[in-house]
Amino acid sequence: MAKASAESLGGAVASEESIASYIGAGILSSGGNAVDAAVATSLALTVLIPHLGGVGGDFFMLYRSPEGRVFFVNGSGFAPRRLTREEVLGRGLKEIPESGPLSPTTPGYLAGLYHSWRSFGAMEWASLVKPARLLASRGFPLPPSTARSLKLRRECLEADPGSREAVLKALPREEGSPARLPGLAALLSGVEEDPLYLYRGEPAEALEEYLASIGGVMGAEDLAGTRGFTAEPLYSEYRGWKVWEMPPNTQGITTLHLLMLLEEEEPPEPFSTERVDILTGLARMAYSIRDRYVGDPRYMPIDPHELARKETLLKLLGQEESNGSKAAGDTTFFAVADREGGIVAGIQSLFYPWGSCVTEPRFQVTLNNRARGFTLKEGLPSTLRPGAFPLHTLSSVIMEQRERVIALGASGGHLRPQQHALFVTNIVDYGMNVLDAINAPRAVWDPGRGEILCEEGFGCRPSWRKVERIGVANAVEVVGSVKRGYTDIRGDGLPAVAP
């Protein structure tokens, strides 16, 4: 069943969970701006779908002000000071594990969210945290996505004592069953008073103690050093549209590279095998640049804004092979537009569903496994270094042409740049409206498995792997004074609007 859009003059919110969208729309109705609503929506998502975007993960935001300026907020964590190549290799490992106590970076989520509000918010902080705290305390129907994840990742969660206690025993199994997260509610109560409570209060001590007990290396000193910050977004153009993406340490530049290469091609039929051949062939080229040159910008051999130029891209192409990133990951994206025309494209994640599968039981904080974004190979921007930021799969898009502005994004990890390219070209090259653009069938190249994934509706070749869904998208659109929210047929959410 296709999801309908919702529109209003007062603002719109689109997220993967309807309750979160309604909470965000309520903030807009109370006089909050897009960033205020984004904070409340985001926190609600940490309660409803903690496996995708909990407080132990990371947060990134593109914000377009009503005046038209675009900002980027980076809320990613870094490698703990004791997480070194020598430490990993000394434990007999050849790479950073997919789960367990060595796989998390510091959780940048709350630091990034707080920095976003401090820089651009208008309402009182506590009023934005309260709805999520009440949701965790009073309870909510277990969303289908969360129920599915508990079954899919049960073995991983069973391996950690904290996850057995604070996730598997704490949450029901069936979707729609009443669920509560009292430990998370206690954490959010502290966050109401102190936005950085996780990093310098009792939760920091609890995290350090628990991780030490299971062989982890992250300590209170690492947590205390975690901060969000603002940086310049990347900008390009595609067939007369302005396009902004998130800069490194995200993979947003790969979206722009893919669009630069697609702009040189004549658009084929929208759901043809030819379109997939072109997209996936160019994706291999764009990803080869990502895997060689993109990571923590402090260690990149080329300035990110120089790397985002088409001339630089064309010069570098063909010099490197892709390293074959291993996993698709999972995420949740949401978007907000306010009455004045401010727009947020927000994205948060633990990387894999339930991240590291390591949960501090008292506060029910499940940590990310974002250290998987590092490599043990030396000399690369993504080489593991204490204090370094990993290569992040998180990114999102804001695109603009005259009075029309669209914020969009999707879950999907390493597949995200190709999905973004599909959405942008659906709108620009094929004239689709935003709802049709995100609901349309998708086909992408999976760099981890080296195969093409194809949804029903594309002309799938027999050699391609047919899948039920590739990611879940959301979007908002501003056209003049009208704001519209859109949610994907693949997800569980609905958009909500403010009058």
Image (cartoon, helix red, strand yellow):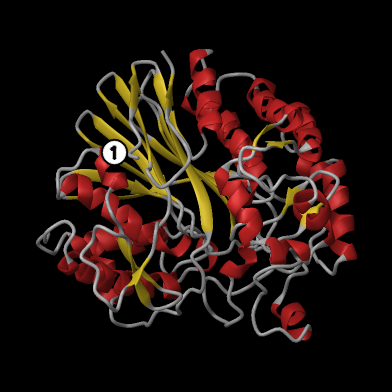
Position of residue 335 relative to residue 205, above or below, is: above
Position of 296 with respect to 449 (left or right) is right
With 270 as the anchor, is 417 left or right in this view? right
Q: Percent position (x, y) of residue 330?
A: 52, 56
**From this viewpoint, is residue 123 visible?**
yes
Q: Is residue 73 visible?
A: no
* Residue 194 locus on image (x, y percent): 76, 31
Q: Nearer the viewer, residue 130 or 374?
A: 130
Question: Residue 105 placed where, x, y %?
Answer: 68, 60
Residue sitting nearer the eye, 199 or 411: 411
Total label count? 1
Picture layout, residue 89 above or below residue 192: below
Q: Position of residue 353 (x, y in %)?
A: 60, 57
Residue occupying image coordinates x 84% and y 40%: 201
Q: Amino acid at mark 1?
A: Leu
For the residue carrying disc 1, how many other residues have a C-alpha within 10 Å: few (<14), some (14-19), or many (20+)?
many
Query: Quarter holding the C terminus?
Result: top left
Q: Secondary structure at mark 1?
A: helix
Above or below, 342 relative to 456: above
Identify the residue at horizontal 47%, vertical 44% (top origin). Answer: 333
Of residues 16 and 287, the one drawn nearer to the viewer in this rendering: 16
